[in-house]
Image (tube, rainbow, N blue to C red):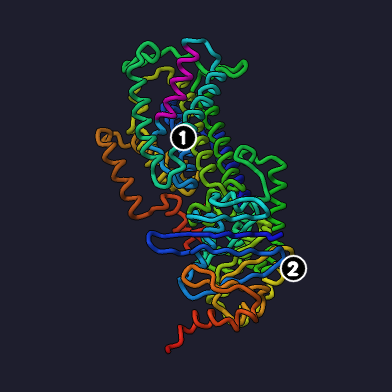
Amino acid sequence: MIKSNYLALLILALVLAFIPLAISNVYYLGILIFVGINSLITIGLSLLMGYAGQISLGHAAFFGLGAYLSGVLSTRLAVPPVSALLLAALFTALVALLIGLPTLRLKGHYLAMATLGFGQIVYIVFNAWVEMTGGPSGFGNIPRLRIGGVVFDTDLKYFYLVWGLVVVGLFFAVNIIHSRVGRALRTMHTSEVAAGTLGINTVRYKIQIFVISAVYASVAGSLYAYFVTFLSPGTFGISFSILLVTMVVFGGRFSVWGALLGTAVLSILPESLRIIKDYDVLVYGAVLLLVMIFFPEGLVGLIGRVFRPRSLPEKLRT
Amino acid sequence: MPLLEVINLEKHFGGLTAINRVTFSIQPGQIKAIIGPNGAGKTTLFNVLTGVVPPDGGEIRFRDGDITGWKSHLIASRGIARTFQIIKIFGDMTVLENVMTGCHLKSKTGLLSAAFHLLPVWREEREIAEKSIRILREVGLEDRAQARAGNLPLGMQRLLEIGRALASEPSLILLDEPVAGLSGPETRELAHLIRRIRDGGTTVLLVDHDMSLIMDISDEVLVLDYGCKIAEGSPREIQNDEKVIAAYLGEEMD
């Protein structure tokens, strides 16, 4: 099954490589860059939701930590962007570890509550620590990302960078799912008791996956900071956390491909339906509700049901 | 030296005493059976021994170390595996994946090395897949390797659960009613399998209600009634024990 995933990755990479040739409009390219950045977050989040069976309502905050830390480090302390991105990821991982250690030992949805509170704290800090973050009005002049001698100063270069990292992120996620660790995580769908008697420390893997998913969000945040070069707290509030969860559920939380699909649809659709802009939260809420009721396996599950009605359960876990 | 020693073990659920100061031991290489009427505390005993629920008193020693109150994954890592009366296979995985999951303790790929899927990881995956196929052949499920485990009939699910437990290469395996719901031929087949497991070096502790199976394969039998040990000995001794007969048939009226 891992081979068919690699094939899909290869096809995705090829399609992505040719997209800029087909789309010359800078506006559309910009949207696709945002889709890529969001996808990086939701791939990590789907690992947490689909495989560790946990929900995070604070992924916008991890995304924000990546963005602000990279922005502040490279603007105020002149840290090279790549080092800043890595430092931000490391710091975010530590924060996630501190949240995950106490909450993931407990059965139930304590992680969702803890991350909800954490998200609010981070949001308040972004607003209140004016000297460092610029407060509600934000701060700008973040330098462009530079790797070696290459400056990523055009949308075209940034498109390839972001989507290159999405492909890498998908590669890691697919490998984790189809490994000893992935199998250990999948046991939690059916029986944690049985998992324990096989020597699987489920708590440990839940914490690890939570930390990894926070790192995905942090890296996406850094990419966001170096792309828009201006940050303000509004981007990183609870509504974005909920949107991320909606994307994962809509696409299909038992598949990283679902995360990609859900993110693409829910990122591009509002752009083409500008009329609903004022009601977007309402629409996302309705989407979440309808999906949970009528097709809990998301778009991927729905497609699977249409094309392979008999082998759905296996296909779900791709 | 006994493989497992249970000393004055106690477990209460509220006011109910499920296990009442039970003491027994298992020698390596034995097939030992626990019998008793429904509600005698057999499954609770298994749950305490494997760390699914903690004991309220007493001591459990395994391979000469104290494992009392340990978490189940740590007890498993010391070498105790089990099956369940109400089957707990991973129904949404394939049969092969179930057994590969059972190999967890005997493999070591961590999250980061899994993410990169480098050569050692690839090699380990292939090794545990081959090992799992061997185990499936041993329990007779080789041709079902790629089937969805949840779709197997009950008898095969029981075999799969035993195979999954064997994959951790335990020194002691606990089988909770392994032949419940199986047909006559299936039961005989399973009796052979249990003997082969023992001959392969794994000590067996089993709970069942099938007396002819128990008397046929066990070296020793322990009888529980209302959480208390009422008898222990060879199958022949147990069959002639008055307390055991009374517990099963009810006291004679005077």
Magenta highlight on residue A65: yes
- Eyeballing the image, is B133 above or below A141? below
- Secondary structure of the residue carrying tag 2 is helix
Task: Compare residues A62 and A118 and report the one nearer the observer.
Answer: A118
Residue highlighted by disc 1: A41
Tag 1 subunit: A
- Eyeballing the image, is A165 above or below A178? above
Which residues fall within the magenta stretch? Answer: A61-75
Q: Amino acid at mark 1?
A: Ile
The structure residue drawn at horizontal position 72% and vertical position 70%, both measured from the top left corner, is B196
Q: Quadrant of the C terminus of chain B?
A: bottom left
Residue highlighted by disc 2: B199
Measure how far apart labels 1 and 2 are at the Cα level. Answer: 52 Å
Tag 2 subunit: B
**Mark 2 residue crowding within 10 angstroms, few (<14) / some (14–19) / many (20+):** few
Residue B116, x across and y down, in percent = 64, 38
In the image as oriented, which residue stretches furthest toward the bottom? B254
**Could you tell me what secondary structure mostly forms the magenta stretch?**
helix
**Mark 1 residue crowding within 10 angstroms, few (<14) / some (14–19) / many (20+):** many
- Eyeballing the image, is B62 above or below A100? below
Q: So how many labels did they put on this image?
A: 2
- Secondary structure of the residue carrying tag 1 is helix
Residue A109 visible (yes or no): yes
The structure residue drawn at horizontal position 72% and vertical position 66%, both measured from the top left corner, is B29
Q: Quadrant of the N terminus of chain B?
A: bottom right
